[in-house]
Image: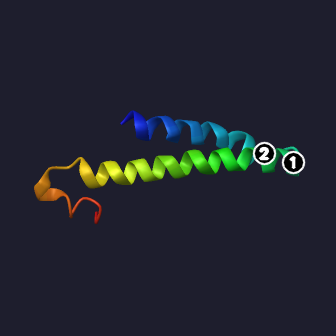
């Protein structure tokens, strides 16, 4: 769960400067690391949902 939680927390913290940039330069610097953190968090979360449930529920959990 740390693999999901840490990038999600980092992405959330990085969204603050990306959401209130004083200039376009700050926005251009703040958005790429935010996007990477959110992408890693989303991918890790999907992997956990697909592999962590018991075998009898594996196909049904992502569908929910």
**Does 30 sit left or right of 11 as displayed?**
right
Q: Residues within 10 Å of mark 1 (few under 14, many from 20)?
A: few
Residue 25: image tag: 1
Which quadrant of the view contains residue 12? top right
**Does 19 sit left or right of 7 as displayed?**
right
Helix, strand or loop status at disc 1: helix
Read off the residue under disc 2: 29
**Does 5 sit left or right of 15 as displayed?**
left
Identify whether 62 is placed above or below 17: below
In the rendered image, residue 52, in percent from the top left (x then y), is placed at: 24, 47
Which quadrant of the view contains residue 5? top left
Of residues 64 and 2, which is closer to you in this image?
A: 2
Residue furthest left as drawn: 56
Seen at 74% across and 44% down, the residue is: 30
In the rendered image, residue 8, in percent from the top left (x then y), is placed at: 51, 41
Which quarter shows the C terminus?
bottom left
Label 1, label 2: how far apart the Cα atoms are? 6 Å
In the rendered image, residue 19, in percent from the top left (x then y), is placed at: 73, 47
Identify whether 20 is placed above or below 13: below
State yes or no: discs 1 and 2 in contact (Cβ < 8 Å): yes
Of residues 59 and 18, which is closer to you in this image?
A: 59
Colouring chosen for the image of the structure: rainbow
């Amino acid at each position: 769960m740390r693999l999901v939680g840490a990038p999600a927390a980092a992405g959330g913290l990085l969204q603050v400067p990306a959401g209130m940039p004083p200039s376009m330069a700050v926005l251009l610097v703040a958005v790429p690391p935010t996007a990477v953190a959110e992408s890693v968090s989303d991918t890790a979360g999907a992997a956990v949902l697909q592999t962590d449930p018991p075998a009898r529920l594996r196909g049904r959990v992502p569908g929910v």
